[in-house]
Image: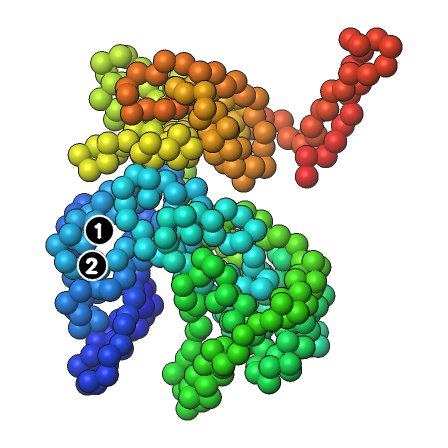
């Protein structure tokens, strides 16, 4: 279920009222990006779901984070944790959350039971990235969707040409055709589908059963979601789905599928990135209604007038020490040294807890928020300075920093030093400089190499950044 899935929760409520059969229902809360972060809003959303579903307790409530840079989700998850302690929620889960932020939330003391993400024989980000290992380490069950790619992983599409008219497809087929394109295209997809067909024939089951069994066998996966519309043919699809439990994949089966997967490309980014950055793998291929920021007219006027612009993050130390989180002069944004300061200090003392890597993720989210407010993006960052308290944390911090900028497609200049940080709980502090509207030209990277009889001679080779 979900708060925005039309009458889905009401259907469950009707079932509860009219049937003696037992049914376990999960639902989601995907709050609008309106900046409201009160306990009253969270309680109202949970109470509405309970009323609609006819439940006294939500077995699993999964929360969707639209923007990691916004601290709204921290407030909301703390509220949900309070409602959990009151008995209104049994388990808290997430949807479409990447490995870094699953880890960050858990190390910050937020109990996470599940993470609902796309996973299939085509979309392998769960196992090709860090998310599977993070979930296994922290006992988080992956609830996988997209297992059948909206119906593409069936006999219906075996040997068929790629659909040309996107508008003629239903929303699921439009969405997952984008996944197929991102994973290497129709030819690569057909290669995997043919391998699934051979395995299906060996076991006398449908292709869909093999595709489902493959995902269920992944160690991090606790369940799969198979979309099914209520219709006179529902029983037929139920029987087909249950076929996934009638056989086991052999080593030869896995080898055949793995060989076919070698023709695939990795879908960009981590799980859930399709909801936060291009390529947007949605039915429309667009998420501007959720992600576009309204233009800041006052900021634009100030910059046009050549004024200095300051951004404050409401830190208690800003007025005491006489500084702000970030300053923009012209095209340059300079962000103050930033730690993993908690937006809910009464509930979470420091974001990321005792993990230096998680504190790095949190600090860079705060940096992202400041740069975004000043009209820039993390792709505009040209320099970072990292201070760590303990030398043994340098590798962990570096990996977290590297992941953020790999996702942005840029490599800023960087300095990393060991320093005595103020505050016993803070393990890392980061300063950042960004240049907005830098000349793009061909986006060339100059690679300098030393060689030859003169060690001081430099050759410059232009290399395309992509």
Query: Looking at the image, do the residues carrying marks 2 and 1 touch, with CB atoms under 8 Å apart?
Result: yes
The percent position of residue 159, horizontal first and vertical second, equals 71, 77
Q: Secondary structure at mark 2?
A: strand
In depth, the one of 189 and 168 nearer the eye is 189
Please indicate whether residue 301 sits to the left or right of residue 258 in the image. left
Looking at the image, can residue 192 be seen?
no
Please indicate whether residue 296 sits to the left or right of residue 277 in the image. left
Q: Residue at x 52, y 18 (%)?
A: 415
View extreme (front): residue: 251
Q: Is residue 109 above or below residue 279?
A: above
The quarter of the picture where residue 195 lies is bottom right
Q: Residue at x 64, y 81 (%)?
A: 202
The percent position of residue 230, horizontal first and vertical second, equals 38, 83
Q: Kindly identify which residue carries mark 2.
A: 89
Q: Is residue 199 above or below residue 189?
A: below
The percent position of residue 436, horizontal first and vertical second, equals 52, 27
Q: For label 1, count other residues whose C-alpha is less than 10 Å away and answer few (under 14), some (14-19) or many (20+).
A: many
The quarter of the picture where residue 9 lies is bottom left
Q: Which mark is residue 135?
A: none
Q: Quadrant of the C terminus?
A: top right
Looking at the image, can residue 204 be seen?
yes
The quarter of the picture where residue 356 lies is top left
Q: CA distance from mark 2 to mark 1?
A: 8 Å
Q: Kindly identify which residue carries mark 1.
A: 80
Please indicate whether residue 291 sits to the left or right of residue 108 in the image. right
View extreme (left): residue: 86
- Whichever of callouts 2 and 1 sits on the residue coming sooner in the sequence is 1
Q: Secondary structure at mark 1?
A: helix
Q: Residue at x 34, y 35 (%)?
A: 352
């Amino acid at each position: 279920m979900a708060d925005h899935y039309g009458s889905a929760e009401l259907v469950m409520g009707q079932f509860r009222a009219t049937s003696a059969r037992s049914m376990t229902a999960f639902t989601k809360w995907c709050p609008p990006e309106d900046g409201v972060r009160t306990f009253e809003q969270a309680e109202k959303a949970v109470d509405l779901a309970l009323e609609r579903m006819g439940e006294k307790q939500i077995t699993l409530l999964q929360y969707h984070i639209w923007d990691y840079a916004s601290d709204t989700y921290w407030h909301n998850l703390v509220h949900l944790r309070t409602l959990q302690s009151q008995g209104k929620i049994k388990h808290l889960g997430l949807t479409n959350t990447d490995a870094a932020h699953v880890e960050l939330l858990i190390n910050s003391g937020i109990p996470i039971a599940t993470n609902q993400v796309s996973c299939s024989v085509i979309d392998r980000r769960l196992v090709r990235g860090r998310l599977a290992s993070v979930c296994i380490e922290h006992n988080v069950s992956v609830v996988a969707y997209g297992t059948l790619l909206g119906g593409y992983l069936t006999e219906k599409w075996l040997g068929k040409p790629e659909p040309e008219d996107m508008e003629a497809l239903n929303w699921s087929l439009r969405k997952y055709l984008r996944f197929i394109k991102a994973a290497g295209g129709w030819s690569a997809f057909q290669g995997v589908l043919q391998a699934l067909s051979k395995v299906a024939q060996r076991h006398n089951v449908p292709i869909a059963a093999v595709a489902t069994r493959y995902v269920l066998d992944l160690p991090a996966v606790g369940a799969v979601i198979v979309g099914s519309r209520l219709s006179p043919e529902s029983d037929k699809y139920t029987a087909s789905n249950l076929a996934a439990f009638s056989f086991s994949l052999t080593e030869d089966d896995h080898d055949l599928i793995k060989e076919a997967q070698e023709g695939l490309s990795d879908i960009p980014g981590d799980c859930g990135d399709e909801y936060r950055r291009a390529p947007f793998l949605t039915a429309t291929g667009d998420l501007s209604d959720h992600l576009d920021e309204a233009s800041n007219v006052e900021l634009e006027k100030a910059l046009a007038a050549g004024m200095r612009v300051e951004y404050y993050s409401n830190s208690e130390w800003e007025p005491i020490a006489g500084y702000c989180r970030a300053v923009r002069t012209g095209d340059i944004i300079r962000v103050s040294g930033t730690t993993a300061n908690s937006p809910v200090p009464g509930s979470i003392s420091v974001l990321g807890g005792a993990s230096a890597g998680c504190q790095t993720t949190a600090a860079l989210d705060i940096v992202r928020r400041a740069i975004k407010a000043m009209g820039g993006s993390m792709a505009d960052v040209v320099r970072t300075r990292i201070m760590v308290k303990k030398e043994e944390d340098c590798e962990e911090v570096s990996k977290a920093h590297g992941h953020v900028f790999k996702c942005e497609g840029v490599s800023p200049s960087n300095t990393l030093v060991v320093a005595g940080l103020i505050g016993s709980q803070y393990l890392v502090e980061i300063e950042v400089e960004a240049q907005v509207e830098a000349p793009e030209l061909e986006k060339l990277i100059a690679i300098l190499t030393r060689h030859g009889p003169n060690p001081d001679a430099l050759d410059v080779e232009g290399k395309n950044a992509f």
